[in-house]
Image: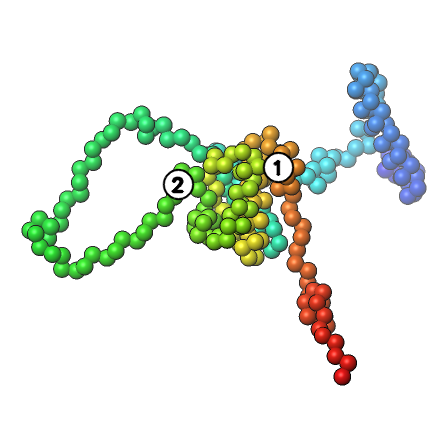
Amino acid sequence: MSGIMQSRMTTSRYRRVLVLLNQLNDYNRIAKTAGCRQLAEGVSHVVEFFERGNKDAVLARGKRKESTLDEYGRSYTVGKRKTSAARVWMIPVQPDASASESPVVSVPPPPKSEEELLGLEPIAPAQPARPSVPVSVTTVLVNNIPLAEYFPIPADRERIIRPFKVAGVLGAYNVFCIVRGGGTTGQSGAIMHGIAKGLVVHEPGLDTLLRRAKLLRRDPRMVERKKTGMAKARKRYTWVKR
């Protein structure tokens, strides 16, 4: 700035120049709104002379990177609560049209063993089959475990499903989460935060609705630290006179 003005630039002078440039920027915006193109172009040339070379990088410094859908239509978001952090992948449920259109093909039964053909009992007892995890068309997996098994407390499950109920899209997405840190309450809150952000990526129109429901804002409440000479954060030891 001193080189442009060819004079010594003190702090007070620099502040006065910034005030004038801000006023010119306001006048430029007013001229564009009023339709005065010639005036707007003249003011913009003056303002652009004092702009930084890395203007776009400076303006984007405080903005968050917007999440987008990948090539498979999945969204990736991160939710946080207390000391828990959850990485959430969401993908819309696609109806299986091939199952209804394809003809029914009879599958031949598996071949029988030699003991079954001869009518003999097997030598070694058959081991019981491992029970398979029932995964529905619309499912929520947390650390590769179904939601009902990972969170046995109903309040935690209701907290996770709340964004779907508020948006009215219950059962419309498959959710896969990886959550680390904290307890069940913090982890469920982190997953809820990530799901709410993922819904906005898929349907931007839900931004206002979820924001009013306070689901897109990270809950800033944390456990207060313990203080020296006290039993807990605010609990004191019992004082005994004698």
Residue 18 is situated, as x and y percent measured from the top left of the image, at: 87, 36
The part of the image, by quadrant, that contains residue 228 is: bottom right
Task: Give the side of residue 102 with respect to residue 228, left or right.
Answer: left
Task: Give the side of residue 96 with respect to residue 19, left or right.
Answer: left
**Residue 17, numbered label:** none
Q: Please state which amino acid type lies under the numbered disc 1.
A: Leu
For the residue pair 94 and 19, the one nearer the viewer reads as 94
Task: Give the side of residue 136 with respect to residue 225, left or right.
Answer: left
How crowded pointer 2 is (Cα within 10 Å; few <14, some 14-19, many 20+) is rated as few
Residue under the image location 83 percent in, 27 percent down: 26
Residue 81 is situated, as x and y percent measured from the top left of the image, at: 61, 51
For the residue pair 71 and 224, the one nearer the viewer reads as 224
Q: Please state which amino acid type lies under the numbered disc 2.
A: Ser
For the residue pair 42 and 8, the one nearer the viewer reads as 42
**Looking at the image, residue 237 lies above or below residue 111:** below
Residue lying furthest left: 118
The residue tagged 1 is: 210
How crowded pointer 1 is (Cα within 10 Å; few <14, some 14-19, many 20+) is rated as many
- SS class, disc 1: helix
Residue 90 is situated, as x and y percent measured from the top left of the image, at: 50, 39
How many numbered marks appear? 2
The residue tagged 2 is: 136
**Looking at the image, residue 221 lies above or below residue 104:** below
Classify the position of the N terminus by image quarter.
Answer: top right
Sooner in the amino-acid sequence: mark 1 or mark 2? 2
Residue lying furthest bottom: 242
The part of the image, by quadrant, that contains residue 7 is: top right
Whether residue 57 can be seen here:
no
